[in-house]
Each structure stands twice: as structure tokens, then as C-alpha cells.
Image (cartoon, helix red, strand yellow):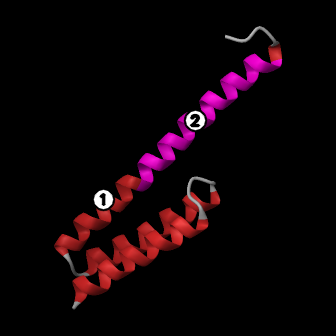
Amino acid sequence: MPNIKSAKKRVLVSRMQNEKNRAAKSALKTQLKKFEAALEVGGDAAQEAFVATVKAVDKAVAAGILHKNNAARKKSQIAGKLNSAQK
């Protein structure tokens, strides 16, 4: 544990940020799993889940959780899954 006051604060701040980032990543992964489950059901549920998942991915980019290219790849993959499931 650091002795300097500013270093102590940085430890606390970085710990809180780490928890926020972990929660955001977990929520994103949960949304991706919900999309996969909705694909199994099909129909309107899959389309709604797709919109919600794209929104979650975009929010993750805005929060700095994902790189924009990683997000584009994820969105492309889920769009492909949705299109192949609808055929």
C-alpha cells in the first residue's frame, strides 16, 4: 500500500474504475448471450435482441470498453448470424 496521499487516491480510483469496467464488460457479454438465445427462438425476438445488442456494443465503445474495430467486427458477426437465421 502506498504512503503518499495522491498514490493512495490513485489506488482507490483505479480500483473503482476496474470494477466499473468489469461490470460493463459483463453486461455486454450477457447481452450477447441474450442475442444468441433469441436467435434460437427466432422471429421478432431475434430482431429486438439484435437492436439491443448493437446499442450495447456502441455504448461499450463510447465508454472505452471496446475498440471501435472490435465493435464493428462484433456487429458484423451478429448481423450475419441474424441474416442466416432468418433465411
Residue under pointer 2: 18
Residue 12: % across, % down: 67, 23
Residue projecting furthest to the top:
3
The image shows residue 20, relative to residue 86, as above or below, that is above
Residue 8: % across, % down: 74, 17
Pointer 2 local density, CA inside 10 Å: few below 14, some 14–19, many at least 20: few
Magenta part of the chain: 6-28
What secondary structure predominates along the stretch shown in magenta? Answer: helix
Pointer 1 local density, CA inside 10 Å: few below 14, some 14–19, many at least 20: some
Task: Name the quadrant of the N terminus.
Answer: top right
Looking at the rendered structure, the secondary structure element under dot 2 is: helix
- Give the left or right position of residue 25, taking residue 30 as reference: right
- Give the left or right position of residue 63, taking residue 52 as reference: right
Q: Residue at 72% x, 12% y: name it.
A: 2
Q: Residue at 30% x, 61% y: name it.
A: 34
Q: How many marks?
A: 2
> Which of 48 and 87 lies nearest the eye of the viewer?
87
Q: Which mark is residue 33?
A: 1
> Which of 34 and 48 lies nearest the eye of the viewer?
34
- Give the left or right position of residue 17, taking residue 82 as reference: right
Q: Amino acid at mark 2?
A: Asn
Q: Amino acid at mark 1?
A: Lys
Q: Is residue 69 magenta?
A: no
- Give the left or right position of residue 9, taking residue 55 as reference: right
Task: Name the quadrant of the C terminus.
Answer: bottom left
Looking at the rendered structure, the secondary structure element under dot 1 is: helix
Q: Residue at 49% x, 62% y: name it.
A: 56
